[in-house]
Amino acid sequence: MIAPDVTYKLEGQPLLEFQPVVDLSDGRLLGMEALLRWDHPRLGRLTPDRLLPQAEVNGDIVPLSRWVLAEACGLAAGWSPSVQLAVNCALSQLRGGLASRTVSAVLEETGLEAGRLTLEITEDTVADGDAFEDLRTLSAMGVQLAVDDVGTNWSSFEPLRRLAVNTVKIDGSFVAGLEPSQGINRLVVETVIHMAHSLGMATIAEGVETAHQVALVKEFDADAAQGWFFAHPMSPDEATTMASSDVVPRFSRTEPTTMVAVRSDAHHVNGHAAKVNGTGAASAGADGDAGGDPDPLGPEATPSDGDEAETGPEVDGAGASSAKAAAEPPKGGTRSAAGGTRGSGGAPGGGKRSSGAKKPTKPSATRKSAAPKRTGGSTD
């Protein structure tokens, strides 16, 4: 283990789980978010909502945060370069420059490239004056920044224009309410995506649990998604197996917890699916022929809305977008397809966007990480 041994005041010990972030255009794995858990001898497994308040009070938060960062970066250093790592960063870490100093030391220790690390922060953190300077330092280092739970505090969009934020993550509570009778949730999701794209930022929908939600967030032009529909949180070993594959794993966008096997000889989906097990780790290719390196610059045939990859040939290229996207000039903000990430929509597939706003077309580029780098806005 890269992470140092630490004695905590809270009984028990920390552990990590990981959850994939999935490209909505073709289902491929973009990144993994590190999720902190705590095994308590009497209380059982604690999630961050119960753990972090106690850690803040008893002083465990600083060593615990460093442990998470070092442990996750140590694992990610051995993953495929195309897989981004996302780690949550608390407001207390950013005050006084602690986060940037810790990140710099951990990246040097583990050998992980700064551009492959995304720090996830909250909207309130972005608006905090003390934290803002350290965020600027982290961005200057090349670390990617993602704002989590977006939609709960609209005041943060102004600071986003002045900070090099690469990605915004739409709060899962809005995704869960994407039903026709709950139009306010649909309006929030569509508006966040439109505003983020206009600022050159990528968007990730959190808490996606159904095929209908996948279709909706695709219709609203979200770039990526994360949630139980694709995979439950998995162990470090399972995440490493998935993220270290020579062939970039690809998830079904119509069948829950299902991965699409890729043929190594023709770079085509082979028509079979590999089921993800109960903890989220992918099984071997359905017919045993998955493997080999896809052409990183080959053409990529993106299926139209409603057509899943298993039902038609889909070229497994790592680069170009669909022919339609390549033919149309970009509209609105521009977003390159390399850089940072973490992990809901509107009318069903094929329907019009409720606001009437034109959907920006993503420029053709080679994806190398969990979400596009920000190209718009100002870093002053």
Image (cartoon, helix red, strand yellow):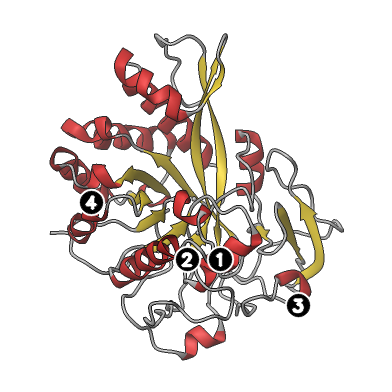
N-terminal of the pair, mark 2 or mark 4, is 4
Report the residue marked by disc 1: 24
Give the amino acid at mark 1. Answer: Leu
Residue drawn 64% across the image and 35% down it: 237
Camera-side residue: 263 or 295?
263
Could you say which quadrant of the image residue 57 lies in? Answer: top left
- Image marks 1 and 4: residues in contact by CB distance under 8 Å: no
Count of numbered circles on the image: 4
Q: How far from the left and from the top, in percent, is residue 149?
A: 38, 48
Q: Disc 1 or 3, which lies upstream in sequence?
A: 1
Q: Earlier in the sequence, mark 4 or mark 3?
A: 4
Q: Amino acid at mark 2?
A: Asp
The answer to whether residue 199 is visible is yes
In the image, is residue 299 above or below residue 226? below
Q: Tell me the distance, in whole angstroms, between the alpha carbons under discs 1 and 2.
A: 6 Å
The first of marks 1 and 4 along the sequence is: 1
Question: Looking at this rendering, what residue extends furthest in the front direction?
Answer: 181
Which residue is at the front of the view, 8 or 332? 332
How many residues crowd mark 4 within 10 Å: few (<14), some (14–19), many (20+)?
A: few
Mark 3 sits on what residue?
312
Amino acid type assigned to the residue bearing label 3 in the image:
Gly
Q: Are marks 2 and 3 in contact (CB under 8 Å)?
A: no
What residue did someone put label 2 on?
A: 223
Q: Is residue 215 left or right of residue 110?
A: right
Q: Identify which amino acid the numbered label 4 is placed on.
A: Ala
In space, the residues marked 1 and 3 are separated at their CA atoms by 17 Å
Q: Residue at x 41, y 54 (%)?
A: 169
Q: Give the SS element for disc 3.
A: loop
Identity of the residue furthest to the bottom in this view:
327
Q: What is the C-alpha distance between the residues marked 1 and 4? A: 29 Å
Quick check: marks 1 and 2 in contact, CB under 8 Å? yes
